[in-house]
Structures are given as C-alpha cells and as structure tokens.
Image (spheres, grey):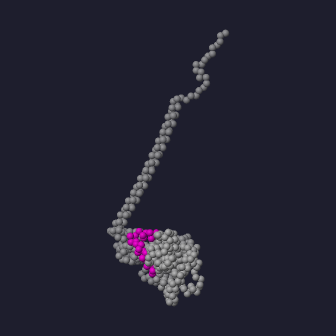
C-alpha cells in the first residue's frame, strides 16, 4: 500500500496568528512627536525672548529715571548758582512781599526763597495777615522770626512743632517759643540732647519717659508772668476769619507731663549753648561765627564728658546715654564747621584760651573775696614753693611711672593751708587750654638742656577738690647735678573725680633717650604733651 504524501503549507509562518503594525502608522506617530517637541522649543524660545524684552525695558526705564534725576540735580545746581547772584532772602524780604500783597513769590522778578524755613515763614505770614491793612498782624522781624526759626531747627525740634509754636505761643520771642514747646510737647518729641540738659541743670533724678502719654495742667512759672507784664504789643497771632469784625480764637489750656517743665535758668543755658549769631552788620549773610561756635562746642563736649563719667560712677546710665548722644550730634556739627572757609584753628585756640582765662580770673576773684586773711595765704604759697624741691626728692624714692601719695591726715594743717599741694594718683583730666610753650616744645627743650644722662619730668597739679580748674606745673631736673633746667611753666586743667584721699595728679618718670616717649607717658597725658620720641 502506498504511503500518503503529507501536505505542506505554502506559508508555514501562518500557522499562528500575528499582529504587526502597519508601517504608515508608525511613521505618522514619529512625525507627531517631533512636531510636539518642535512646538515646545518654539514656546520656550518665545518666553525667553519676552523675558529678555522685559528686562531690557526695565533697564531702559531705570536709565531714563537716573537720567531724569541727574537732569533735576543739574537744574537745581543751576538754580542755586543763579540764586547766589541774587542774594539770600530773609524775613525783611518777606515783609516786602507782604507789602506788595502778592501771594506768589515766583511772580516777583528777582525774588526767591532759598530754603524750607523761609517758605514756611511765608506761608505762616500769609495765613495770619490782616486783610484790611494788607500787613501781618504782628510785625515780622529778622530776629523774632527768621533767626528764631533757625535756632529751633538747630535744637532739633520738628518742623510741625515749630510751626505750631509760632501759631500758639505768647509771642515770637525765643523764650516764649521754647516755653510753649516744653509745656506742650510730650517727652518723646523733645530732642534727646535737650532732655539731657534738663536732667543735668535741674540736678535731680528726673526720669523722662519716652512713652509718657498722661498729661496734667501745668501752671505758668514766674518767668511767664513777668513776660506777660513786660510785653506791650506782643500778642498771639490769631486766625482771622474774613468778616467785618475779626474774632480771636480762644487758646486751650496748655498741658504737658509734669517733668517737662523748665525754668528760666534752663532756657538761658540752652540759648547760651546753641545760639551763636554774629552781630557784625558787614557779615549779614554769615549768621554763625564759625570759630567762636567751634570753640564753644568743644568746651561743651569737655563739660559733658565730665558729666558722663560722673553719671556712670553714680550708676545714672540714662543721663550718660543722653549726654553721649548729645556729644555725637555736637561732633557732627563741628565737622561741618571745619568745612567752612572761615574756620581757623588758631583763632579757635585763642578763643578757648580767652574763655578759660576769663573763667579762671572770675573763679580766682571769687576765691580771694572769700579768704579773709590775704597775708596768711601769701605766706602759705611762699612756704609751699620753698618746700617743693624737698618734696620732689622725697617722693622719688620707691616710685615708678605713677606717683601715688596719700593726702595729709592732719586736719589742722589742712584748715590752715587751703591751697596746700596734695600729691595724688593719676586721674582722668581734661585740658581746656595752655599758655606759654607748647608741651611738645617743652619736652624737646628739656632734652636739649639736659646735662646728665638721665632726667625727670614732673607733672604737679595744685588743687584741693575735684571740679577745680587749676594749673599743671612742669619741671625738669637733672638727677646727678640736682639742678633745675625748666621750671614755672603752667598748663591749665580741670579735675574730673576724687578717689579716696587723692585730690590731684602727680606724674613721675625717668627720661631715657633709649625709650619711647609715648610709652612712658600715660594715655590721658599723651594728647596734652603731644606725640614725640626722645632722641639720643
């Protein structure tokens, strides 16, 4: 029997199912993915381009703003230059403007207001004029208006408080304006340096709170009553309503915290400390005497520095902080004065010497009047001078750089010798001025005249109590020959504090050519003597 042939399939791979994707579909999906990626790139580029345009626009705007500011600055500088040729406008010009009955100063040719103070004064004058006579209710004068406005600004009061004081005070005098400010303002509105003056001059522990809100009515002081009796035509400028019969508004009772009240002594002291105007008619434009102001500010800093140390020793840190803030403000003012073309350090030193000399003469005259026996005093001074040399030799044994000695414990000796020389430990001192040779020249001449290999320079302060402005006597003595080289050169000083039984200052050191001068002299004396190195 023949075998059957098996049938072979023509397509053996079709023996099972297959699901292949058509080639055309695959191509379409790839193109679609590329298209989406391309669109994303275009979107990112578009956003990047917009961000660049925005940044460029901001940059151009900033440049335009800076250019505008620069143009305004140049315009203001040009206005200032043109204004300088016209001259400074003061309260007298405001009176002229008032007489012209013109409310817009810019319409008058050649008439300009050069600072904020004058503009505010003009606004004040316009608001308080009498419509019938076309003049201010009270005569405006440069001393009563312009200068007083500048004084209050210099003291540190705010513009709105100054304007309110001009409207509500008894008169335009500086005393009346200050009184109203102190009685009406809260403690936080009073400048810090003035708070320190209040606390210092009243000499009481007054704690002016910066958050004082409660107010109590305060009675007017005797000085206010005297001002009311003396004033003749000075009256408060009322707000005039435009009617036939002007009515004056009644002023409310002045209220203030109790601890803000001041007396005439305080006001006078503040005026003496801050108000320095030149009386020279030829220098009307220079309101402040630069050199005199600088000298008085320097003396003020010295005085307040002494009070700061005294306050710290008494744990009165509030007063010390206020005085330190005041000193910072004064130093800034002094730096501005140094920039003036009229500033002359030699004139400043001369003024300081003159002020110190006048104060010293006044104090010495007062002391002489208190002493009943002049002959006894002269004899004591003579004995004192004769014994100085002997005391110097005795004090030198066992001493280093600082001389430290106890005061005499004999009460009878002290009572008979009020001006006795008491040798003391080194205290912190402030020097007002000096006369004669400068300390630098004195030290230099000392070495030139020195005979032996060693010498000593002695500082002696002759005084009994702290707070006294006395003198420093400088002597140089050669130890080998016991011969005086320099003597009777006096330098004035003021003691700061008292420690134990020490009532003065005495400094001893050996002048060695091989040593640095600044190393030997303590810090408080370096500024006094000057920086200098001894030479061989």
What secondary structure do most residues of the magenta stretch adopt?
helix
Residue positioned 47% across, 81% down in the render: 360
Residue 174 visible in the picture: no
- Identify the image quadrant of residue 94: bottom left
Residue positioned 53% across, 75% down in the render: 508
Q: Position of residue 144 (x, y in %)?
A: 41, 77
- Identify the image quadrant of residue 318: bottom right
- Identify the image quadrant of residue 217: bottom right
In the image, farthest residue toward the right:
1
Q: Quadrant of the N terminus?
A: top right
Magenta-highlighted residues:
331-358
Residue positioned 34% across, 73% down in the render: 100
Q: Is residue 348 left or right of residue 410?
A: left
Q: Check if residue 214 falls in the magenta segment.
A: no
Residue 229 visible in the picture: yes
The residue closer to the viewer here, 423 or 53, is 423
Q: Check if residue 347 falls in the magenta segment.
A: yes
In the image, farthest residue toward the top:
1
């Amino acid at each position: 029997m023949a075998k059957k042939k098996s049938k072979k399939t023509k397509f053996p791979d079709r023996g099972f199912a297959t699901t292949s994707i058509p080639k055309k579909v695959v191509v379409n999906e790839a193109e679609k993915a590329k298209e989406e990626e391309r669109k994303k790139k275009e979107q990112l580029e578009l956003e990047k381009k917009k961000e660049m345009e925005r940044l460029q626009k901001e940059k151009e705007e900033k440049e335009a703003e800076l250019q505008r500011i620069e143009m305004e600055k140049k315009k203001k500088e040009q206005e200032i230059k043109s204004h300088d040729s016209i001259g400074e406008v003061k309260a007298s010009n405001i009176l002229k403007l008032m007489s012209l009955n013109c409310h817009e100063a810019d319409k008058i040719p050649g008439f300009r207001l050069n600072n904020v103070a004058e503009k505010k004064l003009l606004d004040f004058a316009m608001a308080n004029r009498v419509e019938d006579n076309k003049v201010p209710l009270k005569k405006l004068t440069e001393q009563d208006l312009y200068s007083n406005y500048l004084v209050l600004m210099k003291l540190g009061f705010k513009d709105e408080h100054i304007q309110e004081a001009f409207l509500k005070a008894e008169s335009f005098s500086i005393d009346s304006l200050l009184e109203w400010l102190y009685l009406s303002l809260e403690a936080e509105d009073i400048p810090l340096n003035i708070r320190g003056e209040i606390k210092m001059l009243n000499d009481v522990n007054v704690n002016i709170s910066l958050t004082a809100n409660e107010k109590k009515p305060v009675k007017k002081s005797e000085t206010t009553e005297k001002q009311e009796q003396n004033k003749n035509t000075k009256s408060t400028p009322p707000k005039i309503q435009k009617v036939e019969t002007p009515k004056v508004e009644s002023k409310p009772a002045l209220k203030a915290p109790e601890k803000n009240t001041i007396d005439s002594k305080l006001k006078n002291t503040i005026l003496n400390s801050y108000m320095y105007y030149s009386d020279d008619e030829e220098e009307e434009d220079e309101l402040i005497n630069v050199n005199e102001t600088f000298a008085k500010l320097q003396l003020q800093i010295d005085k307040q520095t002494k009070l700061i140390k005294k306050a710290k020793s008494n744990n009165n840190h509030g007063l010390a902080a206020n005085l330190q803030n005041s000193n910072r403000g004064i130093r800034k003012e002094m730096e501005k004065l140094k920039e003036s073309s009229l500033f002359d350090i030699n004139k400043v030193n001369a003024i300081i010497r003159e002020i110190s000399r006048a104060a010293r003469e006044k104090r010495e005259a007062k002391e002489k009047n208190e002493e009943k026996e002049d002959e006894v005093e002269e004899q004591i001074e003579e004995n004192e001078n004769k014994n100085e040399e002997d005391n110097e030799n005795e004090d030198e044994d066992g001493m280093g750089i600082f001389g430290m000695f106890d005061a005499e414990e004999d009460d009878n000796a002290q009572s008979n010798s009020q001006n006795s020389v008491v040798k003391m430990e080194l205290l912190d001192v402030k020097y007002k001025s000096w006369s004669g040779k400068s300390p630098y020249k004195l030290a230099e001449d000392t070495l030139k005249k020195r005979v032996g290999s060693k010498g000593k320079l002695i500082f002696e302060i002759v005084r009994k109590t702290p707070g006294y402005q006395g003198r420093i006597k400088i002597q140089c003595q050669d130890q080998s020959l016991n011969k005086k080289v320099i003597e009777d050169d006096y330098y004035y000083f003021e003691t700061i504090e008292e420690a134990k039984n020490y009532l003065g200052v005495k400094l001893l050191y050996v002048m060695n050519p091989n040593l640095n001068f600044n190393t030997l002299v303590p810090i408080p004396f370096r500024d006094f003597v000057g920086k200098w190195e001894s030479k061989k």
